[in-house]
Amino acid sequence: MKKLYDTLFLNNRLFYILGGIALLFVVGFFAPLFFFISKVLLFVLMLLVLVDILILYNTKNGVEVQRLLPEKLSNGDDNKITLNIKSNYFFLCHLSIIEELPFQFQKRDFFFDLTLKTNVDKVIHYNLKPTERGIYSFGNINVYASSPLQLATKKYILGNEKQLKCYPSFLKLRDFNFKAFTDDTISYGTKKTRRIGHSLEFEQIKEYVSGDDIRTLNWKASAKRNQLMINQYVEEKSQPVYSIIDKGRAMQMHFNNISLLDYAINATLAISSVILRKQDKAGMLSFSKQLEDIIVAEQRNSQMNLISEALYNIKTDFSESDFSSLYAVVKRKITNRSLLILYTNFETMDGLNRQLSYLRALAKNHLLLVVFFKNTELTSVINSKSETIEAVYDTIIAEKFMHEKKSIVKALKKYGIQSVLTEPQNLTGDTINKYLELKSRGLF
Protein backbone atom coordinates (compact mmCIF):
# COMPACT_ATOMS: atom_id res chain seq x y z
CA MET A 1 0.00 0.00 0.00
CA LYS A 2 2.89 2.39 0.75
CA LYS A 3 4.26 1.85 -2.75
CA LEU A 4 0.82 2.57 -4.21
CA TYR A 5 0.53 5.69 -2.07
CA ASP A 6 3.95 6.98 -3.18
CA THR A 7 3.54 6.32 -6.89
CA LEU A 8 -0.19 6.86 -7.63
CA PHE A 9 -1.45 10.26 -8.77
CA LEU A 10 -4.91 11.32 -9.89
CA ASN A 11 -5.06 13.40 -13.08
CA ASN A 12 -6.78 16.71 -13.60
CA ARG A 13 -9.17 15.05 -16.05
CA LEU A 14 -10.67 13.06 -13.15
CA PHE A 15 -11.32 16.21 -11.12
CA TYR A 16 -12.87 18.00 -14.08
CA ILE A 17 -15.28 15.10 -14.57
CA LEU A 18 -16.05 15.05 -10.84
CA GLY A 19 -16.80 18.77 -11.03
CA GLY A 20 -19.27 18.15 -13.87
CA ILE A 21 -20.98 15.34 -11.93
CA ALA A 22 -21.22 17.63 -8.88
CA LEU A 23 -23.07 20.19 -11.00
CA LEU A 24 -25.46 17.46 -12.16
CA PHE A 25 -26.14 16.59 -8.51
CA VAL A 26 -27.09 20.22 -7.90
CA VAL A 27 -29.42 20.18 -10.91
CA GLY A 28 -30.79 16.84 -9.68
CA PHE A 29 -32.01 18.61 -6.53
CA PHE A 30 -34.62 20.27 -8.76
CA ALA A 31 -34.98 17.46 -11.36
CA PRO A 32 -34.85 13.90 -9.92
CA LEU A 33 -33.87 12.43 -13.32
CA PHE A 34 -30.53 14.27 -13.28
CA PHE A 35 -29.91 13.04 -9.73
CA PHE A 36 -30.21 9.43 -10.94
CA ILE A 37 -27.95 10.14 -13.97
CA SER A 38 -25.37 11.70 -11.64
CA LYS A 39 -25.22 8.58 -9.48
CA VAL A 40 -24.77 6.35 -12.53
CA LEU A 41 -22.01 8.55 -13.91
CA LEU A 42 -20.24 8.62 -10.54
CA PHE A 43 -20.35 4.82 -10.36
CA VAL A 44 -19.02 4.47 -13.92
CA LEU A 45 -16.26 6.98 -13.16
CA MET A 46 -15.12 5.12 -10.07
CA LEU A 47 -15.14 1.87 -12.04
CA LEU A 48 -13.03 3.43 -14.80
CA VAL A 49 -10.56 4.78 -12.22
CA LEU A 50 -10.14 1.29 -10.75
CA VAL A 51 -9.66 -0.19 -14.22
CA ASP A 52 -7.12 2.53 -15.02
CA ILE A 53 -5.14 1.82 -11.86
CA LEU A 54 -5.22 -1.95 -12.45
CA ILE A 55 -3.87 -1.78 -15.99
CA LEU A 56 -1.16 0.68 -14.93
CA TYR A 57 0.07 -1.49 -12.07
CA ASN A 58 -0.56 -4.89 -13.66
CA THR A 59 2.51 -4.57 -15.92
CA LYS A 60 5.83 -4.85 -14.15
CA ASN A 61 8.44 -2.40 -15.38
CA GLY A 62 5.94 -0.76 -17.66
CA VAL A 63 8.45 1.90 -18.70
CA GLU A 64 12.21 1.60 -19.17
CA VAL A 65 14.55 4.57 -19.59
CA GLN A 66 18.30 4.53 -20.17
CA ARG A 67 20.34 7.73 -19.93
CA LEU A 68 23.52 7.85 -22.03
CA LEU A 69 26.10 10.34 -20.74
CA PRO A 70 29.57 11.22 -22.02
CA GLU A 71 32.58 10.28 -19.90
CA LYS A 72 33.15 13.95 -19.09
CA LEU A 73 31.63 17.31 -19.92
CA SER A 74 33.28 20.01 -22.02
CA ASN A 75 33.10 23.49 -20.54
CA GLY A 76 31.44 26.10 -22.75
CA ASP A 77 30.36 23.54 -25.38
CA ASP A 78 27.11 21.76 -26.18
CA ASN A 79 27.35 18.28 -24.64
CA LYS A 80 24.96 15.70 -26.13
CA ILE A 81 22.79 13.68 -23.72
CA THR A 82 20.62 10.80 -24.94
CA LEU A 83 17.54 9.15 -23.39
CA ASN A 84 16.40 5.73 -24.68
CA ILE A 85 12.76 5.17 -23.70
CA LYS A 86 10.72 1.99 -24.08
CA SER A 87 7.11 1.19 -23.12
CA ASN A 88 6.15 -2.37 -22.12
CA TYR A 89 2.42 -1.60 -21.78
CA PHE A 90 -0.05 -3.19 -24.19
CA PHE A 91 -1.78 0.14 -24.85
CA LEU A 92 -0.82 3.60 -26.09
CA CYS A 93 1.02 5.15 -23.17
CA HIS A 94 1.21 8.84 -22.34
CA LEU A 95 4.50 9.80 -20.67
CA SER A 96 5.80 12.89 -18.92
CA ILE A 97 9.55 12.68 -18.26
CA ILE A 98 11.25 15.03 -15.79
CA GLU A 99 15.07 15.07 -15.79
CA GLU A 100 16.91 15.92 -12.56
CA LEU A 101 19.71 18.03 -14.02
CA PRO A 102 22.77 19.20 -12.06
CA PHE A 103 22.04 22.25 -9.91
CA GLN A 104 24.52 24.37 -11.91
CA PHE A 105 21.98 24.63 -14.74
CA GLN A 106 19.22 25.90 -12.42
CA LYS A 107 16.47 24.12 -14.34
CA ARG A 108 13.66 22.59 -12.31
CA ASP A 109 11.14 22.22 -15.13
CA PHE A 110 13.14 20.27 -17.68
CA PHE A 111 10.62 17.75 -19.00
CA PHE A 112 9.37 15.99 -22.12
CA ASP A 113 5.82 14.93 -23.03
CA LEU A 114 5.33 12.06 -25.49
CA THR A 115 3.16 9.08 -26.36
CA LEU A 116 4.54 5.58 -26.97
CA LYS A 117 3.09 2.46 -28.52
CA THR A 118 3.82 -0.89 -26.94
CA ASN A 119 7.36 -2.25 -27.38
CA VAL A 120 8.40 0.82 -29.36
CA ASP A 121 11.64 2.60 -28.53
CA LYS A 122 11.91 6.37 -28.50
CA VAL A 123 15.23 8.24 -28.51
CA ILE A 124 15.46 11.79 -27.19
CA HIS A 125 18.55 13.96 -27.61
CA TYR A 126 19.23 17.21 -25.81
CA ASN A 127 22.30 19.39 -25.21
CA LEU A 128 23.71 20.83 -22.02
CA LYS A 129 26.17 23.73 -22.03
CA PRO A 130 28.08 24.06 -18.74
CA THR A 131 29.73 27.39 -17.98
CA GLU A 132 32.06 26.40 -15.16
CA ARG A 133 34.41 23.55 -14.32
CA GLY A 134 33.68 21.11 -11.51
CA ILE A 135 31.49 18.17 -10.56
CA TYR A 136 28.04 17.90 -12.16
CA SER A 137 25.63 15.51 -10.43
CA PHE A 138 22.78 14.03 -12.47
CA GLY A 139 19.82 12.79 -10.41
CA ASN A 140 17.01 10.38 -11.19
CA ILE A 141 14.67 10.31 -14.17
CA ASN A 142 11.05 10.74 -13.06
CA VAL A 143 8.54 9.21 -15.46
CA TYR A 144 4.78 9.70 -15.11
CA ALA A 145 2.84 7.14 -17.15
CA SER A 146 -0.88 7.16 -17.88
CA SER A 147 -3.23 5.09 -20.05
CA PRO A 148 -5.50 6.46 -22.82
CA LEU A 149 -8.13 7.07 -20.11
CA GLN A 150 -5.71 9.49 -18.36
CA LEU A 151 -7.59 9.33 -15.07
CA ALA A 152 -4.65 8.08 -12.99
CA THR A 153 -0.88 8.24 -13.32
CA LYS A 154 1.88 5.95 -12.11
CA LYS A 155 5.25 7.41 -11.20
CA TYR A 156 8.49 5.62 -12.05
CA ILE A 157 11.82 6.69 -10.56
CA LEU A 158 14.39 5.46 -13.07
CA GLY A 159 17.98 6.08 -14.00
CA ASN A 160 20.99 6.11 -11.73
CA GLU A 161 22.50 9.14 -10.09
CA LYS A 162 25.85 9.90 -11.68
CA GLN A 163 28.56 12.49 -11.28
CA LEU A 164 30.53 13.85 -14.23
CA LYS A 165 33.59 16.06 -14.23
CA CYS A 166 33.46 19.15 -16.41
CA TYR A 167 36.85 19.71 -18.06
CA PRO A 168 38.09 22.69 -20.09
CA SER A 169 36.70 22.75 -23.61
CA PHE A 170 37.98 19.65 -25.42
CA LEU A 171 35.18 19.10 -27.95
CA LYS A 172 36.52 21.86 -30.21
CA LEU A 173 40.07 20.52 -30.28
CA ARG A 174 39.43 18.84 -33.64
CA ASP A 175 38.23 22.16 -35.06
CA PHE A 176 41.52 23.82 -34.15
CA ASN A 177 43.95 20.97 -34.78
CA PHE A 178 43.84 21.50 -38.54
CA LYS A 179 45.76 24.73 -37.92
CA ALA A 180 48.76 22.66 -36.87
CA PHE A 181 49.28 21.51 -40.44
CA THR A 182 50.77 23.82 -43.04
CA ASP A 183 52.35 23.23 -46.42
CA ASP A 184 55.79 22.59 -44.92
CA THR A 185 54.46 19.53 -43.11
CA ILE A 186 53.77 17.73 -46.36
CA SER A 187 56.45 15.17 -47.17
CA TYR A 188 57.05 13.69 -50.58
CA GLY A 189 58.17 10.06 -50.68
CA THR A 190 60.03 8.63 -47.74
CA LYS A 191 63.33 10.48 -48.06
CA LYS A 192 64.39 12.13 -44.80
CA THR A 193 65.44 15.75 -45.34
CA ARG A 194 67.48 17.97 -43.08
CA ARG A 195 66.87 21.69 -42.73
CA ILE A 196 70.00 23.61 -41.76
CA GLY A 197 69.56 26.37 -39.23
CA HIS A 198 71.39 28.26 -36.51
CA SER A 199 69.76 27.00 -33.33
CA LEU A 200 71.52 25.56 -30.32
CA GLU A 201 71.01 21.98 -31.48
CA PHE A 202 74.44 20.86 -32.70
CA GLU A 203 74.57 18.10 -35.34
CA GLN A 204 78.18 17.61 -36.55
CA ILE A 205 81.52 19.17 -37.60
CA LYS A 206 82.22 19.03 -41.32
CA GLU A 207 84.68 20.39 -43.86
CA TYR A 208 84.11 23.89 -45.09
CA VAL A 209 82.85 24.20 -48.67
CA SER A 210 82.22 27.31 -50.68
CA GLY A 211 78.91 28.88 -49.64
CA ASP A 212 78.94 27.77 -45.99
CA ASP A 213 78.41 30.42 -43.37
CA ILE A 214 81.86 31.51 -42.14
CA ARG A 215 80.31 32.49 -38.79
CA THR A 216 80.12 28.81 -37.90
CA LEU A 217 83.87 28.17 -38.38
CA ASN A 218 85.30 25.91 -35.67
CA TRP A 219 88.86 27.19 -35.21
CA LYS A 220 89.99 24.43 -32.84
CA ALA A 221 88.90 21.70 -35.24
CA SER A 222 90.42 23.62 -38.15
CA ALA A 223 93.80 23.77 -36.34
CA LYS A 224 93.76 20.02 -35.65
CA ARG A 225 92.81 19.04 -39.21
CA ASN A 226 94.88 21.78 -40.85
CA GLN A 227 91.86 22.76 -42.96
CA LEU A 228 88.77 24.83 -42.43
CA MET A 229 86.04 23.05 -40.45
CA ILE A 230 82.59 24.37 -39.55
CA ASN A 231 79.93 23.49 -37.03
CA GLN A 232 76.67 22.28 -38.58
CA TYR A 233 73.35 22.73 -36.85
CA VAL A 234 69.89 21.44 -37.56
CA GLU A 235 66.76 23.44 -37.05
CA GLU A 236 65.49 22.79 -33.58
CA LYS A 237 61.80 22.02 -33.90
CA SER A 238 61.01 21.26 -30.29
CA GLN A 239 60.81 24.76 -28.85
CA PRO A 240 59.31 25.19 -25.36
CA VAL A 241 56.02 27.09 -25.24
CA TYR A 242 54.43 27.97 -21.91
CA SER A 243 50.85 29.13 -21.40
CA ILE A 244 50.71 31.41 -18.33
CA ILE A 245 47.22 32.00 -16.90
CA ASP A 246 46.52 35.00 -14.68
CA LYS A 247 44.06 33.91 -11.97
CA GLY A 248 43.71 37.39 -10.48
CA ARG A 249 40.71 39.67 -10.18
CA ALA A 250 41.26 41.03 -13.70
CA MET A 251 40.07 37.64 -15.02
CA GLN A 252 36.86 37.57 -13.00
CA MET A 253 34.74 39.39 -15.58
CA HIS A 254 32.11 37.26 -17.35
CA PHE A 255 31.05 37.18 -21.00
CA ASN A 256 28.20 34.90 -22.09
CA ASN A 257 28.14 33.51 -18.51
CA ILE A 258 31.76 32.29 -18.80
CA SER A 259 34.57 34.03 -16.92
CA LEU A 260 37.68 35.33 -18.68
CA LEU A 261 39.63 32.80 -16.61
CA ASP A 262 37.69 29.91 -18.14
CA TYR A 263 38.11 31.38 -21.62
CA ALA A 264 41.87 31.39 -21.00
CA ILE A 265 41.78 27.83 -19.66
CA ASN A 266 39.88 26.60 -22.72
CA ALA A 267 42.32 28.39 -25.03
CA THR A 268 45.30 26.88 -23.19
CA LEU A 269 44.03 23.35 -23.74
CA ALA A 270 43.41 23.95 -27.45
CA ILE A 271 46.72 25.65 -28.17
CA SER A 272 48.63 23.02 -26.18
CA SER A 273 47.26 20.40 -28.55
CA VAL A 274 48.35 22.45 -31.56
CA ILE A 275 51.81 23.06 -30.03
CA LEU A 276 52.39 19.34 -29.58
CA ARG A 277 51.22 18.60 -33.11
CA LYS A 278 53.71 21.17 -34.37
CA GLN A 279 56.42 19.16 -32.58
CA ASP A 280 57.05 21.86 -29.98
CA LYS A 281 57.06 21.36 -26.22
CA ALA A 282 53.90 22.45 -24.41
CA GLY A 283 53.81 23.53 -20.79
CA MET A 284 51.69 25.73 -18.55
CA LEU A 285 51.48 27.48 -15.21
CA SER A 286 49.03 29.73 -13.41
CA PHE A 287 49.55 32.50 -10.90
CA SER A 288 47.79 34.93 -8.64
CA LYS A 289 49.50 35.62 -5.33
CA GLN A 290 52.00 32.92 -6.22
CA LEU A 291 52.75 30.49 -9.04
CA GLU A 292 50.83 27.20 -9.08
CA ASP A 293 49.89 24.31 -11.38
CA ILE A 294 53.30 24.22 -13.06
CA ILE A 295 53.64 21.71 -15.92
CA VAL A 296 57.15 21.64 -17.40
CA ALA A 297 57.17 21.98 -21.18
CA GLU A 298 57.71 18.54 -22.70
CA GLN A 299 56.75 16.61 -25.80
CA ARG A 300 55.42 13.26 -24.65
CA ASN A 301 52.29 11.19 -25.06
CA SER A 302 50.98 11.95 -21.58
CA GLN A 303 51.50 15.72 -21.79
CA MET A 304 47.94 16.56 -22.84
CA ASN A 305 46.52 14.51 -19.98
CA LEU A 306 48.77 16.31 -17.51
CA ILE A 307 47.77 19.72 -18.85
CA SER A 308 44.08 18.81 -18.94
CA GLU A 309 44.09 17.64 -15.30
CA ALA A 310 46.01 20.73 -14.19
CA LEU A 311 43.56 23.03 -15.98
CA TYR A 312 40.58 21.18 -14.50
CA ASN A 313 41.93 21.66 -10.98
CA ILE A 314 42.68 25.38 -11.26
CA LYS A 315 41.05 27.22 -8.36
CA THR A 316 41.24 30.87 -7.43
CA ASP A 317 39.81 33.53 -5.14
CA PHE A 318 40.46 36.23 -7.78
CA SER A 319 42.87 38.13 -5.56
CA GLU A 320 45.42 40.68 -6.77
CA SER A 321 47.99 39.13 -9.13
CA ASP A 322 51.67 39.33 -8.18
CA PHE A 323 53.69 39.80 -11.37
CA SER A 324 56.93 40.10 -9.41
CA SER A 325 56.45 36.55 -8.16
CA LEU A 326 55.77 35.44 -11.73
CA TYR A 327 59.02 36.99 -12.96
CA ALA A 328 61.08 35.49 -10.11
CA VAL A 329 59.81 31.94 -10.63
CA VAL A 330 60.05 32.08 -14.44
CA LYS A 331 63.63 33.33 -14.22
CA ARG A 332 64.51 30.48 -11.86
CA LYS A 333 62.60 27.60 -13.45
CA ILE A 334 62.49 28.38 -17.19
CA THR A 335 66.15 28.67 -18.17
CA ASN A 336 65.87 28.06 -21.93
CA ARG A 337 64.50 30.73 -24.23
CA SER A 338 60.80 30.00 -24.64
CA LEU A 339 57.60 31.45 -25.99
CA LEU A 340 55.52 32.67 -23.04
CA ILE A 341 51.81 33.15 -23.79
CA LEU A 342 50.44 35.26 -20.94
CA TYR A 343 46.64 35.37 -20.58
CA THR A 344 45.69 38.41 -18.55
CA ASN A 345 43.61 41.56 -18.87
CA PHE A 346 44.44 45.27 -18.76
CA GLU A 347 41.63 47.81 -18.86
CA THR A 348 43.74 51.00 -18.56
CA MET A 349 47.26 52.22 -19.20
CA ASP A 350 47.71 52.67 -15.45
CA GLY A 351 47.00 48.97 -14.99
CA LEU A 352 49.64 48.12 -17.59
CA ASN A 353 52.24 50.55 -16.22
CA ARG A 354 52.08 48.90 -12.79
CA GLN A 355 53.21 45.61 -14.35
CA LEU A 356 55.20 46.82 -17.35
CA SER A 357 58.61 46.55 -15.67
CA TYR A 358 58.02 42.85 -14.96
CA LEU A 359 56.77 42.22 -18.50
CA ARG A 360 59.87 43.91 -19.93
CA ALA A 361 62.08 41.78 -17.68
CA LEU A 362 60.35 38.61 -18.93
CA ALA A 363 60.78 39.74 -22.54
CA LYS A 364 64.57 40.06 -22.12
CA ASN A 365 65.11 36.30 -21.93
CA HIS A 366 61.97 35.00 -23.63
CA LEU A 367 59.57 35.85 -26.42
CA LEU A 368 56.56 37.21 -24.53
CA LEU A 369 53.06 37.20 -26.02
CA VAL A 370 50.47 39.06 -23.94
CA VAL A 371 46.88 38.06 -24.68
CA PHE A 372 44.15 40.31 -23.28
CA PHE A 373 40.51 41.01 -24.01
CA LYS A 374 38.29 43.51 -25.74
CA ASN A 375 35.28 44.60 -23.73
CA THR A 376 32.39 43.70 -26.01
CA GLU A 377 29.94 45.67 -23.88
CA LEU A 378 31.89 48.83 -24.69
CA THR A 379 31.50 48.07 -28.39
CA SER A 380 27.72 47.77 -28.04
CA VAL A 381 27.60 51.09 -26.15
CA ILE A 382 29.66 52.83 -28.84
CA ASN A 383 27.52 51.43 -31.66
CA SER A 384 24.23 52.30 -29.98
CA LYS A 385 22.39 55.50 -30.87
CA SER A 386 22.80 58.26 -28.27
CA GLU A 387 19.49 60.07 -27.75
CA THR A 388 20.14 61.67 -24.34
CA ILE A 389 22.98 63.64 -22.75
CA GLU A 390 23.66 60.72 -20.41
CA ALA A 391 23.93 58.34 -23.36
CA VAL A 392 26.40 60.70 -25.05
CA TYR A 393 28.56 60.71 -21.91
CA ASP A 394 28.43 56.90 -21.79
CA THR A 395 29.53 56.71 -25.43
CA ILE A 396 32.45 59.10 -24.86
CA ILE A 397 33.65 57.15 -21.81
CA ALA A 398 33.34 53.84 -23.71
CA GLU A 399 35.40 55.27 -26.60
CA LYS A 400 38.02 56.43 -24.08
CA PHE A 401 38.34 52.91 -22.66
CA MET A 402 38.55 51.43 -26.18
CA HIS A 403 41.31 53.91 -27.00
CA GLU A 404 43.15 52.82 -23.83
CA LYS A 405 43.12 49.22 -25.09
CA LYS A 406 44.73 50.27 -28.36
CA SER A 407 47.28 52.33 -26.45
CA ILE A 408 48.21 49.24 -24.45
CA VAL A 409 48.96 47.36 -27.68
CA LYS A 410 51.21 50.21 -28.86
CA ALA A 411 53.01 50.40 -25.51
CA LEU A 412 53.75 46.66 -25.53
CA LYS A 413 54.99 46.81 -29.12
CA LYS A 414 57.30 49.69 -28.18
CA TYR A 415 59.19 47.37 -25.82
CA GLY A 416 59.28 44.42 -28.20
CA ILE A 417 56.42 42.53 -26.53
CA GLN A 418 53.99 40.72 -28.82
CA SER A 419 50.28 41.13 -28.07
CA VAL A 420 46.83 39.86 -29.04
CA LEU A 421 43.76 41.98 -28.32
CA THR A 422 40.72 39.81 -28.94
CA GLU A 423 37.10 39.25 -28.06
CA PRO A 424 36.55 36.41 -25.56
CA GLN A 425 34.70 34.19 -28.02
CA ASN A 426 37.55 34.52 -30.55
CA LEU A 427 40.34 33.99 -28.02
CA THR A 428 41.33 30.45 -28.99
CA GLY A 429 41.43 31.01 -32.74
CA ASP A 430 43.28 34.34 -32.52
CA THR A 431 45.88 32.95 -30.12
CA ILE A 432 46.56 29.91 -32.32
CA ASN A 433 46.92 32.15 -35.38
CA LYS A 434 49.42 34.34 -33.54
CA TYR A 435 51.44 31.32 -32.39
CA LEU A 436 51.60 30.00 -35.96
CA GLU A 437 52.61 33.43 -37.23
CA LEU A 438 55.46 33.72 -34.69
CA LYS A 439 56.63 30.21 -35.49
CA SER A 440 56.61 30.79 -39.24
CA ARG A 441 58.67 33.96 -38.74
CA GLY A 442 61.20 32.02 -36.69
CA LEU A 443 61.02 34.38 -33.71
CA PHE A 444 61.47 31.59 -31.17
Image (tube, rainbow, N blue to C red):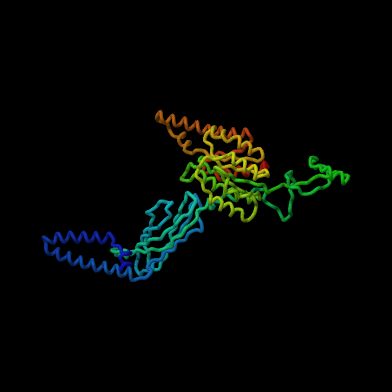
| Quadrant location of the C terminus in the rendered image | top right
Left/right of residue 15 with respect to residue 136 in the rendered view: left
Instruction: Point out residue 388 in the picture as x, y percentages from the top left corner.
Output: 39, 29
Look at 18% across and 60% down and name the residue there.
22
Question: Which percent across, then down, holds residue 438?
Answer: 64, 42
Q: In this view of the protein, which residue sits in the foreground, 405 or 28?
A: 405
Q: Position of residue 218 (x, y in %)?
A: 82, 43
Q: Is residue 156 above or below residue 316?
A: below
Given the current orientation, which residue lies at the most extreme right position?
Answer: 226
Could you say which is closer to the camera, residue 330 or residue 232? Answer: 330
* Picture residue at 63% right of the left edge, 49% below the top: 296
- Residue 289: image quadrant is top right
In the displayed structure, 127 sits above or below 286; it is below
Q: How many marks?
A: 0
In the displayed structure image, the side of residue 331 where residue 386 appears, left or right? left
**Residue pictured at 12% horizontal, 61% vertical:** 29
Q: Tell me, yes or no, if residue 159 can be seen here.
A: yes
Quarter of the picture containing the N terminus is: bottom left
Q: Position of residue 322 (x, y in %)?
A: 56, 40
Does residue 178 appear in the picture of this structure?
A: no
